[in-house]
């Protein structure tokens, strides 16, 4: 993650980051209550999941997979309150297994204020450095495959 926020991040109302993703790294299922985010592909392909509330007797929300890339959907806006997560689209599906993505969010950075709220149905890990979780592997099955295109 590289912070491109201009000036002092604590006084700037727009946080701009560049995130590098490798196969197996992920962001947990989370949401932000007070701001929207926009994600723009710079290179590679990012499997980006958005979540709808559980239906009927289901305990987990329904995930929709979007592939963000420079050769397809390049930009995705996530409104405040919408749960989302992401991982590099894997090589096994015909993708490069990596992604470089710009992220912009409408808030000032303050490490003392919690802005990321995890979805209780997907565990409590904020850290995506321990390899791809089993539920994310299942979510990837809903993604379009570059191999079938």
Image (spheres, rainbow, N blue to C red):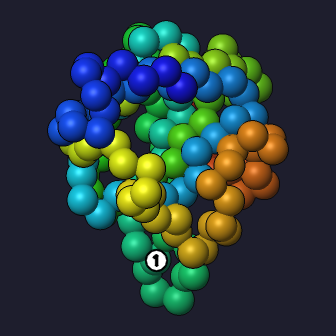
**Left or right: 72 as drawn, with respect to 29:** left
Rendered residue at 36%/19% (across/down): 4
Q: Is residue 84 visible?
A: yes
Quarter occupied by residue 124: bottom right
Question: Mark 1: which secondary structure?
Answer: loop
Q: How many marks?
A: 1
Q: Quadrant of the N terminus?
A: top right
Rendered residue at 57%/21% (across/down): 20
Residue 24 position in % (x across, y down): 75, 34
**Left or right: 42 as drawn, with respect to 104:** right
Residue 117 position in % (x across, y down): 46, 64
Rendered residue at 81%/44% (across/down): 130
**Left or right: 143 as drawn, with respect to 125:** left
| Residue 115 sits above or below residue 47 on the image | below
Q: Is residue 38 visible?
A: no
How packed is label 1: few (under 14 Cα within 10 Å), some, or many (20 or more)?
few
Residue 39 position in % (x across, y down): 35, 30
Q: Which residue is label 1 attached to?
A: 54
| Residue 115 sits above or below residue 4 on the image | below
Residue 23 position in % (x across, y down): 72, 27
Farthest bottom residue?
A: 57
Rendered residue at 76%/51% (across/down): 133
Camera-side residue: 74 or 127?
A: 127
């Amino acid at each position: 993650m590289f912070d491109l926020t201009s000036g002092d991040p604590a006084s700037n109302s727009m946080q701009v980051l560049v995130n590098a993703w490798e196969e197996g790294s992920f962001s947990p299922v989370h949401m932000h209550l007070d701001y929207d985010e926009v994600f723009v592909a710079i290179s590679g392909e990012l499997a980006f999941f958005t979540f709808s509330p559980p239906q009927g007797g289901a305990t987990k929300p329904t995930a929709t997979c979007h592939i963000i890339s420079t050769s397809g959907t390049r930009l995705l806006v996530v409104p405040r309150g919408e749960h989302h997560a992401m991982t590099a689209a894997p090589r096994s599906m015909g993708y490069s297994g990596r992604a470089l993505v710009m992220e912009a969010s409408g808030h000032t950075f303050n490490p003392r204020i919690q802005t990321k709220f995890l979805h209780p149905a997907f565990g409590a890990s904020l850290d995506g450095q321990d390899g791809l979780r089993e539920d994310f592997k299942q979510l990837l099955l809903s993604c379009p495959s570059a191999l079938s295109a």
